[in-house]
Image: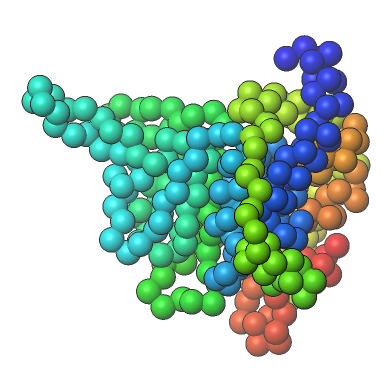
Amino acid sequence: MTDQQIIQVLEEAPKRLEKFKEEVAKAIVGQTDAVDLITMSLLCGGHSLLVGVPGLAKTLLITSVSKALGLEFSRIQFTPDLMPTDITGTDVLNAKREFEFHKGPVFANVVLADEINRTPPKTQAALLEAMQERKVSISGTSMDLPNPFFVLATQNPIEQEGTYPLPEAQLDRFLFNIFVGYPSQEEEEKIVKATTIGVREEIQPVISAEEIVDMGKALRAMPVTEETVKYAVELVRKTRPGSPGADPMADNYLNWGAGPRASQNLVLAAKAMAMMEGKGTPSIAHVKRIAIPVLRHRIVANYRAKGEGITEDHIISKLL
């Protein structure tokens, strides 16, 4: 992209993204923070994990996003008997007695990984490898996944029996850990009215795959001040217990801190927030506003923190 094209994309992005969020709002009442974070995830080319109890429209939110983007969508319902080839695809013997590769559901622009903690680690690893490498290897052949490619996974935090929690190293591959909470009373009343009276509005695609790719390129080209980068790095270094620059809060309440990928993602997410607001460059304020969903799944609280009822979100708030 030329400098002029980048400037044009950055100027048009706020209106385009606002239109996108308006389309999603046809199906989703409230959850504005979750919608904003998913939008930022798409701009950054990252993946997101949505955590919340059943019935909060996590799946509907993701399907609505795919419809508003006009991208190819697939859903994988994770179960204990799901195999890696059920995700990536497999070689099948055709009528000519030749092996032919049948693509799995991971070959889509937007992949909904529903209840990702319901399947064994081997199958989780197959998806997470595709997320990281953006390609799939079958029988010695490597195939690229579509561009853009996003995985939006859901997880139920209250039901742990028969589940396989994602290891910290695999959680680190998600740009955001998005907490989906209960709606307010006013929002819940709107949800009930919208779902029990009349017909829902159809969501129309308002952003193409090419536009998402162009926005991602423009985001990478967006300048960042030294002060913003320095703040993001210092914030992440504060989370590492026993290391230079660690905060006493981390030394007392954390077993493990965030790695360099957290610093990178803080800056990228701050850029995405600035783009949505029509700002030319992200500020320290943007980094602060995005810190909790970027860091909450990258730090590990110790037994002392759990015994005192101190959560990862509380620790990050104190570090800020």
Q: Quadrant of the N terminus?
A: top right
Q: Is residue 120 visible?
A: yes
Which of the 4 image quarters holds residue 309?
A: bottom right
Please name the residue shown 71% across and 44% down the image. 23
Total labels: the figure holds 0
Please name the residue shown 65% across and 59% down the image. 198
Is residue 10 depicted above or below 120 in this figure? above
Which of the 4 image quarters holds residue 275?
A: top right
Q: Is residue 242 visible?
A: no
Query: Residue 151, percent across and down?
Result: 53, 45
Please name the residue shown 58% across and 50% down the image. 62
Query: Residue 296, percent across and down?
Result: 68, 63
Which of the 4 image quarters holds residue 312?
A: bottom right
Please name the residue shown 64% across and 28% down the image. 208
Is residue 240 depicted above or below 133 in this figure? below
Outermost residue to the bottom = 307
Left or right: where 278 falls relative to 195: right
Q: Quadrant of the C terminus?
A: bottom right
Left or right: where 147 falls relative to 318: left
Query: Residue 18, percent across and down?
Result: 80, 40
Query: Residue 54, percent across and down?
Result: 55, 71
Q: Nearer the viewer, residue 225 or 157?
A: 157
Q: Nearer the viewer, residue 208 or 187?
A: 187
Q: How is the image coloured?
A: rainbow
